[in-house]
Image: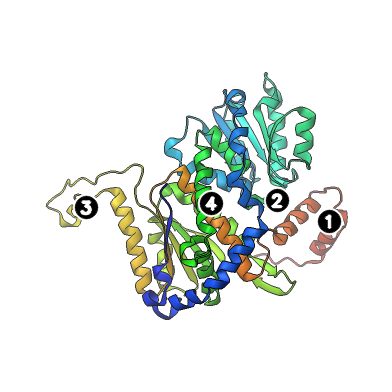
Amino acid sequence: MESIMLDYTNCLSSAIGSEGISLSELENYEEYMAKCVEEIEKEKFGFMKLPYSDIPKQLDILDERMDFVENIIVLGIGGSALGTAAINDALSDINSKRKLFVCDNSDPAYLTRILEEVKLDKSVFIVVSKSGTTAETMASFLIVRKRLDKIRDGYKRHLIFITDPEKGVLRKLSREEGILTFDIPPDVGGRFSVLSAVGMVPSYLLGFDVDSILAGAREMDKRVRERNLFKNPAALNALIHVLMMKKGKSISVMMPYSNELKYLADWYVQLWAESLGKRFDISGKVVEVGQTPIGALGATDQHSQLQLYNEGPRDKIITMIRVERHQHDLPIPNIYPEEERLSYFNDYTLGDLINYEQLATSISLTNNGRSNLTLIFPHISEEILGQFFYMYEMQTAIAAKLLNINAFDQPGVEAGKNATYALMGRKGYETLREEIISKLKTRERNLV
């Protein structure tokens, strides 16, 4: 199996000067990083079990029960949707004739357009919520559920729930109404759930090889358990990012040079932001730590964001994703050989161009003393995606260990959820509702 490789050359001081990290500085952390990896291995976080789960065997039931499906509509938000969207876009070349729609917002126009485009009797709606109380997801579910009453063969056939194995509204409804349901393990949070039923059920329905995705994750699991820092891409990348944070690099950019991988950056943005943006460390000390992740797209954003990255504040570490062998490529024809400004394309392909653009970006950033890494994909496949997801999940857990924070909670998100429940009048949130309304009444608004 071919593997993802991490090129960290342009984060070293030998390449970018004082903005970089010396090789000896990284070497000084070798023993400490080995202990971090060992501790994480002992803790056996939930996401670490997913590559070895029996989810592929559970999916056989879909062959018979979902043979009518032409449209797959995922109702979920954040980690319940981003991984699925990323897999679908990355593997669009091998997608079946089924079409995926991801309803990951409570925008009424957005859901209306989806419902107008699909035929309900040819669709399955996958409702993803571990708690079964996610406001955006459950509101969309209720709207869809009402529409499905029109289906002659019954609404149940057109629903799949993915939720907690024991608790929550969706689990209750699944038992009462006999709706096909898959589990989200209790110890796996949404942003770490792509390799669970959350990402694998829709992937299977779309015709992707779930076994190969998990095989890629297992292959990466071997690499990220390495005690040798320089053989462990997750540990090394986590350390580099944390050391760069201490050097004032408060922004982490992920820039795939492939439209098919654009959603990988979106998935990373949630994982990194929600896991590492914390007010308190594990001991309760106020630290207000975190690194702001940003998604970009090469080569598109060379013509916009790169100006800022090259000449703006020195507060960023940039990771480019390079695909060595593109699934499809197009030769650039030499139609005007007498025109020097066009004839230089001769003998090159569009794949050559985008890869040279990635290299050019790396060179320009390095020449300006800007830290940058290149994550090299030999190609895009199920195995490579499995490696990517698992590497970054482990990298996030290691970075949290270095920062002494909890990577698996999200109190800042919960505060917003609770306020929404209160404003919508959910039972149990009456006191919070009164507090919010009181503050809104006394707060002076400034409008122009």
In this view, which residue lies farthest toward the bottom?
18
* Callout 2 amino acid: Asp
Marks 2 and 1, Cα distance to the nearest angstrom?
31 Å
Q: Secondary structure at mark 4?
A: helix
Q: Residues within 10 Å of mark 3 (few under 14, many from 20)?
A: some
Identified at 43% across, 54% down, the residue is 4
Give the residue at mark 4. 389
Whole-percent x and y of residue 62?
60, 28
**Image check: 178 left or right of 56?**
right
> Which of pointers 3 and 2 lies earlier in the amino acid sequence?
2
* Callout 4 amino acid: Phe
Identified at 35% across, 59% down, the residue is 358
Give the residue at mark 1. 433
Q: Splitting the image into 4 quarters, where does residue 301 fall?
A: bottom left
Q: Which mark is residue 187?
A: 2
Marks 3 and 4, Cα distance to the nearest angstrom?
36 Å
Whole-percent x and y of residue 341?
19, 57
In this view, which residue lies farthest toward the left?
338
Q: Which mark is residue 62?
A: none
Q: Which mark is residue 345?
A: 3
Q: Secondary structure at mark 2?
A: loop
Q: Secondary structure at mark 3?
A: loop
* Callout 1 amino acid: Arg
Identified at 64% across, 36% down, the residue is 126
Q: Secondary structure at mark 1?
A: helix
**Image check: 229 left or right of 166?**
left
